[in-house]
Amino acid sequence: GGDAGPGREGLRTDSMNVATIDLGTGQAALFGLPRNLKLVPLPDRFRKSFVELEERVIERDLTDEDEDGYPDAWIDEDGDGVPDEPEFESCECFPDMLNTVHQTTEDWFSTYPYSPDPGLSALKEVVSYLLDLHIDYFVMVDMAGFVDVIDAIGGVDVLVKEPYHVTVSAPKEGGPKATVSVEPGMNHLDGLEALAFARWRRGSSDYHRMRRQRCLVRAAATQTNTLELIRAFPTLLDVMEERVTTDIPIDFLPDLVWAAGLVDIDDVATVGFVPPRYNNGRTPGGYPIPNVDRIRSTVRNVIENGAVAQSSTGESECS
């Protein structure tokens, strides 16, 4: 999901999830990636692509100040009160936050000449390498599109674990703000309410917000049966044309809608690759570094053992 909306410049992929569906069994999984991951490994053909960006990020981290007035990445091994200038050696990774891959590569038209959005194609390839999982397609929806999709399927029922009474900015120019007021238990949300529920972060962490987003996507994908999806298909096509960017072939969409109707909510595992379990330390600026081996192992276990087996171990988080 992208954060584009009224009063916002550019687009960052602040909500990143990878969905897998077994078209034979209907078993599915949803893997969530933190937007602030840094030093993400790259496929071989990209390993020299971000060296200049890496140098800029290092310089920025050495000069940006934290809330106490010290550089975020202060390193002073000789104790002279001056930040050390480390000898540069490229990590051959993506040095900035994962949610900026799209912005950094959105003009890579020569690399992805047939893509509707080169930045999303690059992000797909980077995430595919991180998870060691072939990703067939990408779908990117902005905030207004998210509202329209939820409304098109008749809203969504979500299990809320704590009360939320929040308002966030309007997803459409001149439109109403998104407001949600819910108590613990099952709640039915329309598009604007679902957006407020998914976006709210104040008073909680990025990782709590990620969990709410995964559970919301899980619920939306499993509560609508095949017949309802077919009925909503014309509206969904209109939303996709206006608000969604994807490389899914148009003639594959009916098959995808049919497959989504086969998914049972009890057969969907949700896993968030969040600290501390899935990070391998932090950068000097405090950003999580992914534990690649553990992430890949978890992906394999979920897919090979089946979503039901994995969720019974506590990996799934929406019940």
Image (cartoon, rainbow, N blue to C red):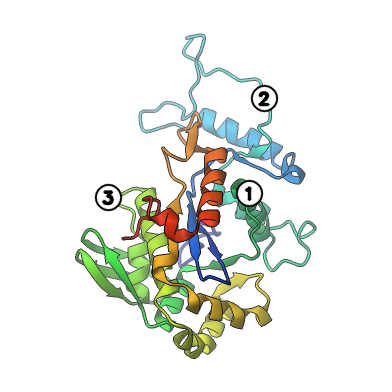
Q: Which residue sits at x=38%, y=83%?
A: 154
Say which amino acid is labelled 1: Asp
**Element type where label 2 sits in the image:** loop
**Does residue 226 sit above or below 215 in this rendering?**
below
Q: Which of marks 2 and 3 is nearer the N terminus?
A: 2
Crowding near pointer 3: few (<14 within 10 Å), some, many (20+)?
A: few
Give SS at disc 1.
loop
- Residue found at x 65% / y 79%: 252
**Callout 3: helix, strand or loop?**
loop
For label 2, count other residues whose C-alpha is less than 10 Å away and answer few (under 14), some (14-19) or many (20+). Answer: few
At a point 50% along the width and 33% down the height, the residue shown is: 280
| Label 1 Cα neighbours within 10 Å, binned few <14 / some 14-19 / many ≥20 | some
Q: Is residue 152 left or right of residue 19?
A: left
Image height of 82 relative to 122, above or below: above
The one nearer the camera, 116 or 161, is 161
Name the residue tied to disc 3. 203
Q: Which residue in the structure is indicated by mark 2?
A: 88
The reply to whether the C-beta atoms of the residues labelled 2 and 3 are less than 8 Å apart is no
Residue 42, percent across and down? 67, 43
User: Where is residue 86, by image quadrant?
Assistant: top right
Q: Which amino acid does label 2 sit on?
A: Phe
Side (left or right) of 268 relative to 248: left
